[in-house]
Every structure is written in structure tokens, then in C-alpha cells.
Image: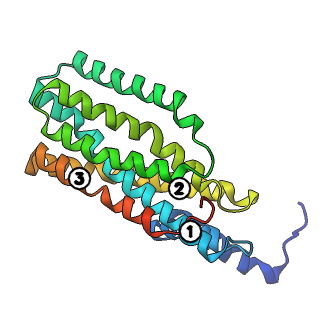
Amino acid sequence: MLPETLRKDTKGSSVSSGFQETRDLLSPVALFRFSAVTRREDSPSKQSMENLRALGLVYFSYLFLFSGLEFTLSFLTHQRFQFTSMDQGKMFFFIGITMAVIQGGYARRIKPGHQIRTIRLAIMSLIPAFILVGLAWNLTLLYTGLFLYSFAAAVVVPCLSAQVSEYGLASQKGTVMGILRSLGALARALGPILASSVYWLAGSEVCFVVSSAFFILPLALLRRQRWSKEE
């Protein structure tokens, strides 16, 4: 048997800190507060933490709304335009190709310091995008909305990830990005549940138009913060 190397007087605190670290990575409240980052002695400044929490809320609210409407898109096209499986495939092919072109030709050329401005523009484009999709009575309007939708889908998450990655020391990057991805996973789990419930209870028009209005929330969060790293 190997000798014990952990002193008896530190065993309790070690176990306690382990439970605390686990809680910080599992509790939704702790995730939104980025508690796993703030508990460290070398945590970022107060202003940086406020910005980081705001970006976390923006990321969550954006993906919560976006994933919900994305989930109900197939219902809408099947009900309103009688899309078959082949038609659905063509639609998602159009979305994928558009996203690839925008990411390769535009998103990758966005200079550091311009991410917040680009995120605002992309989220603003989602408001008319989902209104057009929700109210579309012909394929021209539908695909116009889907083009704007594809632009935002190609830009927002990469730019938000790039902006968040600027916060924290090198030793904290993994924790910061891990928390961000956890918030995204939580949003993608909850968003479709609420959106599909509204869709089937109130109808596609109400679901898409009302949800598009709620994109004002992440825009307001972006507007109220002081982005010293960018400006």
C-alpha cells in the first residue's frame, strides 16, 4: 500500500471544495453567475464578470428562442406548404449552404473588436426573419425569411464564442467556455418544449411573431453593457 500523502487537517476542506466545484458546474443558477470562475483567487475584474454574465444571458436567451423556432419550422412548412420529406431536405440544404457561404466568406473575416456589433446586426435580422417565416403565404417569402435566418445562424454563435473566449486567464478558458456550452445545452433542451407548446396551442403565426419580438431581450442585454474590450 502507498502511504497517505494528504494531511488529515486538509481532508475535510478538500472534500467540501470538491462538492462546491461540482455544484458550480451543475446548478443552473451557478452557471448563469459563472460561479466556477468567480470563486478562484485569480478571477477576472468586476466589470469583466458583469460582461461575462451578460454574454451568458445573451447566449442562453438567443439559443432558447432560436432553437425553439428551429424545432417548429418543420411543422410549419408541412402544415402550410405540404412539404414532403424531400421538400424538407431541400429547405435544410438551402439553409446549410447559405450558412456555409456566410461563415466562409463573411464570418471568418470579422475582425477582433467587431463581434458585438456583428452579433447585434445578426440578432436584429432574426426579427424580420421569423416574422416572414411565420406569416409567409408563398415560398418566396418563406425563403427570404430563411435566408435572414441562415445569416444569423452562421454568425451569432461563432462571434459570441469568440467574444467570451477573451475573458479570463489562460488557465480559466476551459471553465469559461465549458459554462457557456452548458448554458447553450440548457437553452436547446428547454426552448423546443416551450415553442412547440405555444405552436400547437396558439398557432404558428402567434408562435413565430411573438417569439421574434422576444429577440429584443438579448439586444437589450448587449446594449446596456460597457464593452471595454471592444470599444
Of callouts 2 and 3, which one flags the residue occurring earlier in the amino acid sequence? 2
* Amino acid beneath label 3: Ser
Work out whether mark 2 precedes mark 1 in sequence or the reverse, and give the earlier one. 1
x and y percent of residue 97 in the render? 41, 22
Against 94, is 159 above or below? below
- Could you tell whether 62 is left or right of 50 in the image? left
Does residue 19 appear anywhere in the picture?
no
CA separation, marks 2 and 1?
13 Å
- Report the amino acid beneath label 2: Leu
The kind of secondary structure element at disc 1 is helix
Residue 128 sits in quarter: top left
- Residue positioned most to the bottom: 9
> Whole-percent x and y of residue 108?
58, 35
Provide the secondary structure element on which disc 3 rests. Answer: helix
Whether tag 2 and tag 1 are in contact, CB under 8 A, the answer is no
- Where residue 169 appears, as percent x and y from the top left, is 73, 61
Residue with the most extreme right position? 3
What is the CA distance from the residue labelled 1 to the residue labelled 3? 30 Å
Above or below — where is 206 with respect to 58?
above
- Looking at the image, which is closer to me, 66 or 197? 66
> What residue did someone put label 3 on?
211
Q: In which quadrant will I find the N terminus?
A: bottom right
Front label number (2 vs 3): 3
What residue does disc 1 label?
24
**Image point 35% across, 27% down: which residue?**
95
Q: Which amino acid does label 1 sit on?
A: Asp
